[in-house]
Image (cartoon, rainbow, N blue to C red):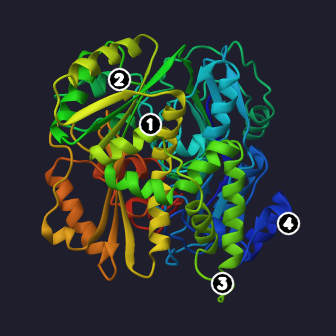
């Protein structure tokens, strides 16, 4: 038996004031925030978006999440599950004020336990655990995670990545995926149900299951091997099919929509079970520069189709984002380099709190902390290695390739031969310092685009951020925009995961340009190219969900209680069977 039903259902209609009283009794006054002025940070998206909420909750245990869900169901509330809130498409916060029921946000970051199981070959993650935490714990046991941070922020959660099909930068791993999870959902009868598909014996009631999991009361060394997937084991073969006319990964791919995986908050996910991987004995980074789109397309095809060992990582940067990242991502680069990644999540949190307070004072300039950090960074010495800067001057396109073990010699021999007679490209073998700098520079790119917008707020328009996946057989992979679009653009910033053919395309619009109209023209062009979007940041409230994805959401959440409005779907309640 793996489904456990609560007594809570929509047959009761608890008034909002009583909802708050009950939630406060469960959590204590310190862990519930109903004051809009004090919970604003948790109601606003990382880049954009936001809305109102009856309250933001901060449960400290899995059982408290369950008890809060029961109260929310009794009160006919909308439920928005939230962890690190690092999504780029507004999917983990309310969206506007036009909901038909009270909105409750449940932030799970305090519940951040991680269990290594079966000789460290798998992990079970609770909802607040971050990828950064996972990397640190696995490093201590000589294992590697299913994903690493690729394009956004250091605080991203493991469960958030699974829920949103996040891809990350690892070529061999593919999107975050598992068929083993523990979650709550509201069924077609309006009843709250706990579903245990972790394939771990944790007890016979929700209280037992959640308490035992929270406290680690289960055998972590002798769990039975499951026939279900705890990672996308088919992904390497998928990207090696370089003649396929479909993308390698994208959010609406129904092959990888399964319960918690891709749920986008349409379930309350308590835990996921994921594979880990052996660490490489040796790694080597190669830095490639080229002025030919076609040359890099051939390089990609030959590496993926002929290598016995595909790259660990292959990150692309156009010269324009190289420049923007060098200037506007410099403080991020230097902070990570000198303070380490352990300090960054806390520093980002402190910055967010300061920004929230300063925003209340009308006399304080907008984005004051960003502007101060930018000023300090500008007076510091050059931070990028000499050879990277030389390649910036010589080449429009930059590719950072990391190989491991036997793949190092394979790549060295190939690159030497491939560029032997090239007039448009070259490569160099990185020192450790150059490798670290190249990947830090690439990591800083996404935040740098936002910083550029902040520093030019008087003259530049909004950012239009797209993440797209193009067909695997494409040779002309860099878009060619018509004048009808380029006339609205101040900057085009291209970067992404090159071997996966997943690109992040940030457009800084000119002041006064209509963002919605430009986006519409962009998406029409992408449709003609056979591209899929979004590729790894999920639809949120910014994209329309494709039919397969809409049907998946409706199956998971038949009453439209969890995160309604995702994928530009209706926000209104769907009648459950008991109401018909």
Secondary structure beneath disc 4?
helix
Query: Which numbered dot is residue 169?
Result: 1
Residue mark closest to the camera, 1 vs 3: 3
In the picture of the structure, the residue carrying the numbered disc 2 is 236
N-term mark: 1 or 3: 1
Which mark is first along the chain, 4 or 2?
4
> Camera-side residue: 511 or 65?
511
Q: Earlier in the sequence, mark 1 or mark 2?
A: 1
The mark closer to the camera, 2 or 3, is: 3
Residue 487 position, x and y percent, is 20, 73
**Cα distance, mark 1 to mark 2?**
13 Å
In front of the other: 252 or 266: 252
Q: Badge 1: how crowded within 10 Å, few (<14), some, or many (20+)?
A: many
Q: Residues within 10 Å of mark 2 (few under 14, many from 20)?
A: some
Q: Is residue 580 visible?
A: no
Q: Residue 29: which disc?
A: 4
Does residue 362 lie above or below 34 as drawn? Answer: below
Q: Kindly identify which residue carries mark 3.
A: 364
């Amino acid at each position: 038996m793996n489904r456990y039903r609560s007594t809570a259902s929509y047959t009761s209609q608890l008034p909002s004031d009583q909802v708050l009283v009950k939630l406060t009794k469960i959590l204590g006054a310190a862990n519930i925030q109903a004051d809009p002025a004090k919970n604003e940070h948790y109601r606003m998206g990382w880049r954009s978006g936001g809305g109102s909420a009856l309250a933001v909750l901060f449960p400290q245990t899995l059982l408290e999440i369950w008890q809060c869900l029961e109260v929310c169901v009794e009160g006919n509330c909308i439920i928005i599950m939230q962890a690190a809130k690092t999504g780029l498409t507004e999917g983990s916060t309310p969206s506007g004020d036009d909901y038909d029921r009270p909105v409750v946000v449940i932030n799970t970051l305090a519940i951040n336990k991680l269990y290594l199981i079966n000789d460290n070959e798998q992990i079970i993650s609770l909802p607040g655990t971050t990828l950064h935490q996972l990397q640190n714990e696995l490093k201590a046991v000589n294992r590697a995670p299913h994903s690493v941070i690729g394009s956004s922020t250091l605080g991203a959660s493991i469960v958030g990545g699974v829920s949103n099909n996040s891809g990350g930068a690892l070529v061999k791993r593919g999107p975050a995926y598992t068929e083993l999870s523990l979650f709550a959902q509201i069924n077609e009868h309006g009843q709250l149900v706990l579903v245990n598909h972790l394939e771990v014996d944790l007890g016979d009631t929700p209280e037992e299951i959640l308490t035992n999991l929270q406290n680690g009361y289960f055998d972590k060394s002798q769990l039975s091997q499951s026939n279900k997937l705890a990672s996308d084991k088919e992904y390497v073969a998928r990207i090696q099919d370089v003649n396929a006319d479909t993308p390698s990964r994208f959010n609406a791919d129904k092959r990888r929509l399964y319960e918690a995986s891709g749920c986008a908050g349409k379930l309350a996910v308590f835990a996921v079970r994921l594979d880990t991987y052996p660490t490489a004995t040796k790694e080597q980074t190669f830095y490639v520069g080229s002025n030919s789109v076609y040359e890099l397309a051939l390089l990609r095809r030959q590496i993926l189709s002929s290598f016995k060992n595909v790259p660990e990582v292959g990150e692309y940067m156009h010269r324009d984002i190289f420049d923007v990242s060098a200037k506007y991502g410099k403080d991020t680069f230097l902070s990570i380099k000198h303070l380490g990644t352990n300090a960054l999540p806390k520093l980002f949190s402190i910055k967010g709190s300061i920004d929230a307070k300063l925003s209340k004072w009308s006399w304080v300039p907008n984005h004051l902390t960003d502007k101060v950090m930018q000023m300090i960074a500008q007076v510091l010495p050059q931070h990028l290695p000499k050879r990277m800067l030389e390649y910036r001057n010589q080449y429009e396109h930059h590719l950072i390739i990391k190989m491991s073990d036997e793949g190092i010699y394979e790549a060295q021999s190939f690159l030497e031969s491939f560029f032997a007679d090239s007039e448009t490209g070259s490569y160099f073998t990185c020192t450790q310092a150059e490798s670290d700098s190249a990947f830090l520079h690439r990591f800083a790119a996404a935040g740098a685009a936002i910083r550029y917008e902040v520093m030019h707020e008087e003259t530049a328009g909004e950012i239009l951020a797209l993440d797209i996946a193009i067909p695997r057989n494409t040779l002309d992979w860099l878009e060619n925009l018509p004048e009808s679009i380029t006339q609205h653009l101040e900057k085009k910033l291209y970067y992404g995961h090159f071997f996966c053919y997943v690109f992040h395309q940030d457009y800084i619009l000119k002041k006064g340009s209509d963002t919605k109209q430009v986006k519409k023209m962009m998406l029409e062009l992408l449709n003609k190219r056979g591209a899929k979007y979004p590729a790894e940041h999920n639809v949120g409230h910014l994209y329309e969900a494709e039919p397969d994805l809409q049907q998946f959401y409706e199956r998971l959440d038949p009453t439209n209680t969890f995160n309604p409005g995702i994928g530009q779907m209706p926000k209104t309640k769907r009648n459950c069977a008991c109401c018909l």
